[in-house]
Image (tube, grey):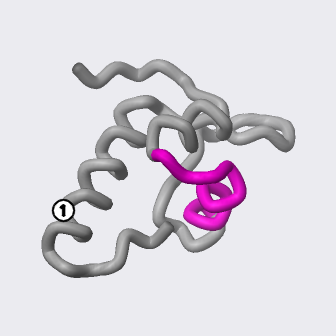
Amino acid sequence: METDERLTTIEAAAILGIRPATLRMQVKNRRLTPVPQRGRDHFFLRSEIERYGREILRRSHAGGTAGG
């Protein structure tokens, strides 16, 4: 079930099974959008991370690159 829970970079990376640095690269490449906020830390909506995870799985099953 998708929720609008906010996740830290470390939590989001763990859900996706990637390193935090890889997640930050996905933000830099505009594949993921963090929650707008002040400060340096990124937060992500759980629903956005789950959507991105499904997208990665679809690409990997279709023979494309996972992007991370």
The quadrant of the rendering that contains the N terminus is top left
- Left or right of 56 on screen, residue 9: right
Residue in view at x 63 percent, y 61 percent: 22
- Is residue 22 part of the magenta span, yes or no? yes
Q: Residue furthest bottom?
A: 64
Give the residues drawn in magenta, as a range.
Answer: 17-27
- Name the image quarter holding residue 55: bottom left
Residue in view at x 25 percent, y 57 percent: 57
- Name the image quarter holding residue 48: top left
Please name whichever residue, 58 or 44, is drawn nearer the observer in this view of the structure: 58
Q: Which residue is mark 1?
A: 58
Report x, y in % for residue 20.
Answer: 67, 49
Report x, y in % for residue 28.
Answer: 65, 68
Q: Main secondary structure of the magenta part?
A: helix
- Left or right of 3 on screen, residue 9: right
Q: Residues within 10 Å of mark 1 (few under 14, many from 20)?
A: some
Please name whichever residue, 33 or 14, is drawn nearer the observer in this view of the structure: 14
Q: Of helix, strand and loop, which one carries label 1?
A: helix
Q: In the image, what residue type sits under mark 1?
A: Arg
Name above or below for residue 24 compared with residue 59: above
Residue in view at x 58 percent, y 45 percent: 34
- Left or right of 66 on screen, residue 20: right
Residue in view at x 26 percent, y 80 percent: 64
- Name the image quarter holding residue 4: top left
Q: Residue furthest right?
A: 39
